[in-house]
Image (cartoon, rainbow, N blue to C red):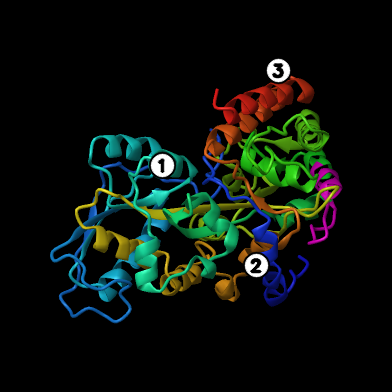
């Protein structure tokens, strides 16, 4: 594997690259794919409760806010598998040490998070502190159901400027900040060295292009022991292809759909042709739940996945050798997609200061550094990016500096836009429509969405 550019050099360009980006939603998993921003979820009862009692010690100096409500109990909910849940249990322990007197009742919701939280908000039982994606931001910010954090940020000495710029766009409405980014991720080309050796071809490098993916996938698939390239009908995995060809799903002002453009349709034709000739397989085609699992089970030679692969492979397939290089370049430019989610506060929390303190702490500099050490996610502050030390994470994170990289955010209807792209790919992969037919349909669907129809 070619060595990625130095992180110091790479991340000097991040602020410029990301200022031009538009922000995205948390990727909602396609039916057979891992969530685009998280590791595959292990189902657990939505009612699971794990309360962490605050230690009876004096408040530490690094609690974000002073004068927290006496006897406060704050419910915190997010999604994620066992690995992610442990990351936040450890974070809660650190919060308890910093802010004694507050009890955090951690209630993870691994599946159907948005649906369940919306129902809880309507019923007056929503968590005090919760993950926020574009869907929940759209549902809750404009209705005043989540609280703006700016005054609490000012009190805690936290500024918007200290975060990677594009990550905040999704969480901003009318100049106010309704959540703070908890992490972000990009995609890299994950591969099995043994599949390349078996096919008698060279391993991928950081200089690979689309043509290299196709050539290698053809060679691996023809040998018959492995599928070539694994990709589902997933907008998130498709996005770097579209962006790498100079395309986007909508205009930067979120008013015009751009799915029937040559740039997007050429990208769809590329992956569609690979699916038709057998060099591209979905996870279901090879008997896996998602493409990362297909790598772990040695069913395919390549796929594109994010930093969640590190802990997934370590925990589930520790004996499988795999490597990662940055996402291959498209015909027009190198490009990747950035995923992000935030943490926000219920505006009707009985303990608003304690809830805000928890949100600030979880997304704060010190806690971000500790989470980065686990390999779970990347820090949201540019000056902490040198904390990424794992070679796999370095290769994946390099995509954040590519000139065509952007966050797939298309305004308040981002989820619907991205879903329409995924459904267009499904029709192409199944052969029920041509690329022109499918993306013409998606163009009209997305335009109607953007027009509010």
Residue to which mark 1 is pinned? 142
**Label 2 Cα crowd, 10 Å radius (few <14 / some 14-19 / many 20+):** many
Where does the C terminus fall, quadrant-wise? top right
Please report whichever mark, 2 or 1, sits nearer to the chain's N-terminal start. 1
Report crowding for label 3: few under 14, some 14 to 19, many 20 or more residues within 10 A (C-alpha).
few
Name the residue beneath numbered marker 3: 432
Q: Which residues are magenta?
A: 200-217
- Viewer-proximal residue among 52 and 260: 260
Secondary structure type for disc 3 = loop
| Residue 215 is one of the magenta-drawn residues | yes
Asked if residue 244 is positioned above or below residue 392 in the image, the reply reads: above
Identify the disc placed on residue 282: none
Task: State which quadrant residue 236 falls in.
Answer: top right
> What is the spatial separation of the Cα atoms under label 3 and label 1, in whole angstroms?
39 Å
Looking at the image, the residue that sits furthest to the top is 432
First along the sequence among labels 2 and 3:
2
What residue is shown at x 50% (from left), y 65% (from top)?
A: 160
Identify residue for label 2: 394
Residue 371: x and y in percent read: 45, 68
């Amino acid at each position: 594997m070619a060595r990625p550019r130095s992180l110091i050099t790479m991340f000097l360009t991040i602020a410029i690259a990301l200022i031009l980006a538009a922000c995205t939603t948390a990727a909602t998993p396609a039916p057979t794919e891992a969530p685009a921003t998280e590791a595959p979820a292990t189902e657990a009862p939505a009612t699971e409760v794990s309360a962490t009692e605050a230690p009876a010690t004096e408040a530490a100096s690094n609690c974000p806010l002073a004068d927290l409500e006496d006897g406060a109990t704050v419910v915190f909910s997010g999604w994620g598998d066992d690995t992610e849940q442990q990351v936040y249990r450890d974070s809660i322990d650190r919060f308890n040490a910093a802010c004694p007197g507050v009890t955090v009742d951690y209630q993870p919701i691994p599946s159907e998070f948005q649906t369940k939280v919306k129902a809880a908000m309507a019923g007056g039982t929503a968590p005090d502190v919760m993950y926020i994606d574009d869907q929940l931001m759209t549902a809750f910010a404009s209705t005043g159901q989540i609280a703006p954090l700016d005054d609490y940020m000012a009190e805690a000495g936290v500024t918007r400027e200290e975060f990677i710029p594009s990550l905040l766009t999704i969480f901003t409405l009318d100049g106010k900040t309704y959540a703070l980014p908890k992490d972000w991720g990009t995609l890299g080309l994950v591969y099995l060295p043994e599949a390349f050796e078996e096919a008698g071809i060279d391993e991928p490098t950081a200089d690979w292009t689309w043509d290299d993916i196709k050539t290698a996938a053809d060679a691996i698939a023809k040998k018959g022991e492995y599928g070539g390239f694994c990709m589902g009908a997933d907008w998130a995995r498709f996005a770097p292809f579209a962006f790498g060809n100079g395309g986007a799903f909508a205009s930067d002002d979120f008013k015009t759909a751009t799915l029937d453009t040559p740039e997007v349709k050429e990208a769809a034709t590329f992956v569609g042709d690979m699916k038709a000739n057998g060099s591209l397989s979905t996870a279901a085609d090879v008997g896996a739940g998602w493409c990362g699992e297909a790598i772990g089970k040695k069913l395919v030679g390549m796929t594109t996945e994010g930093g969640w692969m590190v802990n997934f492979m370590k925990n589930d397939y520790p004996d499988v050798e795999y490597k990662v290089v940055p996402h291959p370049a498209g015909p027009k430019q190198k490009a990747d997609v950035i995923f992000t989610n935030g943490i926000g506060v219920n505006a009707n929390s009985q303990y608003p200061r304690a809830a805000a303190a928890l949100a600030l702490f979880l997304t704060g500099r010190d806690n971000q550094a500790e989470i980065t050490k686990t390999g779970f996610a990347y820090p949201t502050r540019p000056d902490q990016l040198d904390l990424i030390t794992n070679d796999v994470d370095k290769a994946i994170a390099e995509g954040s500096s590519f000139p065509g990289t952007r966050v797939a955010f298309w305004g308040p209807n981002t989820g619907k836009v991205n879903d329409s792209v995924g459904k267009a790919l499904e029709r192409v992969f199944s052969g029920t429509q041509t690329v022109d037919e499918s993306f013409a349909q998606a163009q009209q669907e997305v335009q109607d969405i953007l027009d509010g129809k």
